Amino acid sequence: MLIHKDESTLKERKIKVLLSKYEQLNPEFPHFNLNFEGVQKLGEVDCYVIKMTNTIYNDTTLFYYNASNFYLEKQIEIKPNKEVRTIFSDYRDVSGVKHPFRQEIETLPIEQKETEQTNTYKVNIKIDSALFEPPRKVTEDFHFLSGKSVENIPFNFIENHIFLPVNIGGKENL
């Protein structure tokens, strides 16, 4: 299997790893910068605006925190090739911590809109480790028409989406 790792995807992954380690909160870490941008209205709600930038991918994230309850109301991620706007709502208590159970996400410039609705949120649940074991017996529920064990299928990878060429009625479309 051939995996093409483009530079922007590798940078995005590096940022995600650093964020998972909360490096953006470390004042000694040279790649992140946090700034208070003031108070801005989102509808009728006053929000504190925090701007986070990094030097690895040259992107910016704006966080809009409700000034009265400190819930994250909105987040805008501005990257070199796209912008992702997320609205958070339906906050509920889960083991003493408020979590948004609804997220409305818009990705530009492709104008993709998604809504994520969480029904149940459980913390510290026990997971059977057998779920992560490889299957004991490999069963093949597919076969290659050419008899080969590998196929090379060209595709385009654009904004984390795979686009395959398709031939319908003699016309090739992507």
Image: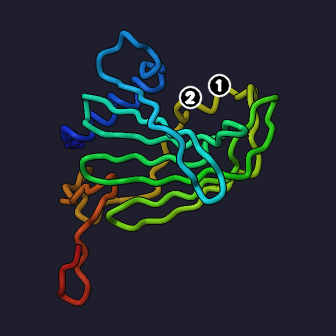
* Color encoding of the figure: rainbow
The image shows residue 39 at horizontal and vertical percentages of 54, 42
Q: Tell me the SS state at disc 2.
A: loop
Q: Which mark is residue 129?
A: 1
Q: Tell me the SS state at disc 1.
A: helix
The image shows residue 22 at horizontal and vertical percentages of 48, 20
User: What residue occupies the far bottom of the structure in this picture?
Assistant: 169
Cα separation, mark 1 vs mark 2, equals 7 Å
Where on the picture, by quarter, is residue 70? top right
Location of mark 2 (residue): 133
Judge by depth and name the residue closer to the eye, 132 or 34: 34
Judge by depth and name the residue closer to the eye, 171 or 123: 123
Question: Which three-letter amino acid code belongs to the residue tagged 2?
Answer: Glu
Tell us which disc is closer to us: 1 or 2.
1
Residue at the image point whose x is 18% and y is 80% from the top: 172
How many badges with numbers are in the image? 2
Q: Where is 151 relative to 30, above or below? A: below
Q: Where is 26 relative to 166, above or below? A: above
Residue at the image point whose x is 44% and y is 26% from the top: 19
Question: Which three-letter amino acid code belongs to the residue tagged 1?
Answer: Ser
The image shows residue 14 at horizontal and vertical percentages of 32, 28
Where on the picture, by quarter, is residue 151? bottom left
Do labels 1 and 2 touch, CB within 8 Å? yes
Judge by depth and name the residue closer to the eye, 149 or 119: 119
Residue at the image point whose x is 61% and y is 59% from the top: 43
Residue at the image point whose x is 81% and y is 29% from the top: 96
Quarter of the image for the C terminus: give it. Answer: bottom left
Quarter of the image for the N terminus: give it. Answer: top left
The image shows residue 15 at horizontal and vertical percentages of 35, 30
Judge by depth and name the residue closer to the eye, 106 or 166: 106
